[in-house]
Image (tube, grey):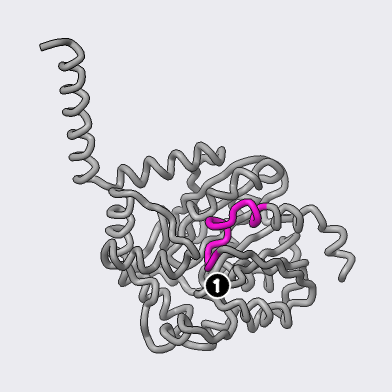
């Protein structure tokens, strides 16, 4: 047998072995993709203990602090497409909220809007010193950020609410939630693709076995997701606590929204605008609910433009 033939056979065997390993442990493929995206963004993984939880978070860059707060069923990795652009000017922190991603989930923990706002406060004290920070909250994370901002005006420089939950709106998604459904429920790869179709205007290509790993991870936490959904949407006094507190937000606030959001209807932006004293609004096209992933350039440009105008925004006070 010639040498090149032996090399081909060896390569084929190695390839088959790799596929076998990935089929057995598809999480390896997802971990590898996240590592690649972290490298591209210049982000590193860190750990901290705060609010009786162990947190894992991403950090990149230096300078004034920007904290990125993910949404329901989300994670710190949702922000990777824009971390690189932001970290050229700011120290960016993107945590997994307690209960989500790689941060600790406690059996006796509570993870609604109010509790997570308290958790966020402790995280900021442990990592950013709680002074002169800019906070960006997406979806559920927007509601958490709004609640925190309403109670911590001295610590906050600017606020961004991105497709943020926490105020009333009416669309198919909200009607399903009020009927007791979990529209984000993932039990297998088919339901994962269904969620992709809801939150993305154009669902991304997610190759096997990464989709297998993601579907398994989501299916394993479906009971937790249902409990959190009940705590942030089951009772109006809890579901709309961020909106009820919004009138106490004193800092300049950017409302950043996908024009065709099928999850948090665009009308929710107007509700926040009516209740927060100093706002401006930016609309994104070509996305449903995940502007930082579907329109990362437009999203990072909007944030950087807003962050660069603190004097102009503060003058509105």
Q: Residue at x 64, y 51 (%)?
A: 128
Q: Does the magenta stretch include residue 83?
A: no
Q: Tell me the quarter of the image containing the C terminus.
A: bottom right
Quarter-of-image position of residue 257: bottom right
The mark total stands at: 1
Q: Residue at x 48, y 74 (%)?
A: 112
Tell me if mark 1 has few (under 14), some (14-19) or many (20+) residues whose alpha carbon lies within 10 angstroms of its own.
Answer: many
Q: Residue 229 vs residue 265: left or right?
A: left
Q: Where is residue 156 in the image (x, y as percent from the top left)?
A: 72, 61
What span is in magenta?
Answer: 287-300
Residue 104 in view, yes or no = yes
Looking at the rendered structure, the secondary structure element under dot 1 is loop
Residue 103 lies, with reference to residue 285, above or below; the image says above
Q: Residue 24 vs residue 299: left or right?
A: left
Q: Residue 302 vs residue 44: left or right?
A: right
Q: Position of residue 189 (x, y in %)?
A: 28, 61
Q: Does the magenta stretch include residue 288?
A: yes
Q: Where is residue 88 in the image (x, y as percent from the top left)?
A: 68, 41
Q: Which residue is drawn at 39% across and 68% down?
A: 195
* Frontmost residue, 125 versus 165: 165
Q: Where is residue 107 in the image (x, y as percent from the top left)?
A: 34, 67
Q: Tell me the quarter of the image containing the N terminus.
A: top left
Q: Residue at x 53, y 38 (%)?
A: 40
Quarter-of-image position of residue 245: bottom right
**Residue where numbered disc 1 is placed:** 261
* Frontmost residue, 301 versus 53: 301
């Amino acid at each position: 047998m010639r040498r090149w033939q032996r090399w081909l056979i060896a390569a084929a065997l190695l390839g088959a072995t790799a596929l076998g390993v990935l089929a057995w442990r598809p999480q390896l493929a997802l971990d590898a993709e996240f590592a690649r995206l972290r490298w591209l963004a210049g982000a590193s993984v860190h750990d901290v203990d705060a609010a009786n939880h162990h947190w894992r978070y991403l950090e990149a860059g230096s300078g004034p602090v920007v904290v990125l707060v993910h949404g329901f069923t989300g994670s710190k990795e949702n922000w990777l497409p824009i971390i690189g652009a932001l970290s050229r000017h700011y120290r960016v922190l993107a945590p997994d909220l307690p209960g989500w991603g790689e941060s600790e989930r406690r059996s006796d923990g509570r993870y609604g809007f109010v509790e997570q706002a308290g958790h966020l406060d402790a995280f900021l004290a442990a990592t950013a010193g709680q002074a002169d920070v800019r906070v960006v909250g997406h979806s559920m994370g927007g509601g958490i950020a709004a609640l925190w901002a309403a109670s911590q005006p001295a610590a906050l420089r600017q606020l961004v609410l991105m497709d943020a939950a926490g105020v009333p709106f009416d669309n198919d998604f909200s009607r399903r939630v009020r009927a007791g459904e979990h529209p984000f429920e993932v039990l297998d790869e088919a339901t994962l693709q269904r969620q992709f179709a809801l939150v993305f205007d154009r669902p991304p290509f997610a190759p096997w076995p990464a989709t297998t790993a993601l579907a398994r991870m989501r299916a394993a936490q479906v009971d937790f997701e249902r409990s959190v959904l009940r705590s942030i949407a089951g009772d109006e006094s809890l579901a709309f606590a961020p909106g009820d507190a919004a009138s106490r937000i004193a800092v300049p606030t950017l409302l950043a929204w996908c024009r065709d959001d099928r999850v948090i209807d665009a009308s929710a932006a107007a509700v926040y605008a009516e209740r927060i004293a100093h706002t401006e609004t930016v609309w994104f096209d070509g996305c449903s609910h995940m502007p930082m992933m579907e329109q990362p350039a437009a999203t990072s440009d909007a944030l950087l433009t807003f962050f660069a105008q603190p004097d102009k925004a503060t003058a509105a006070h």
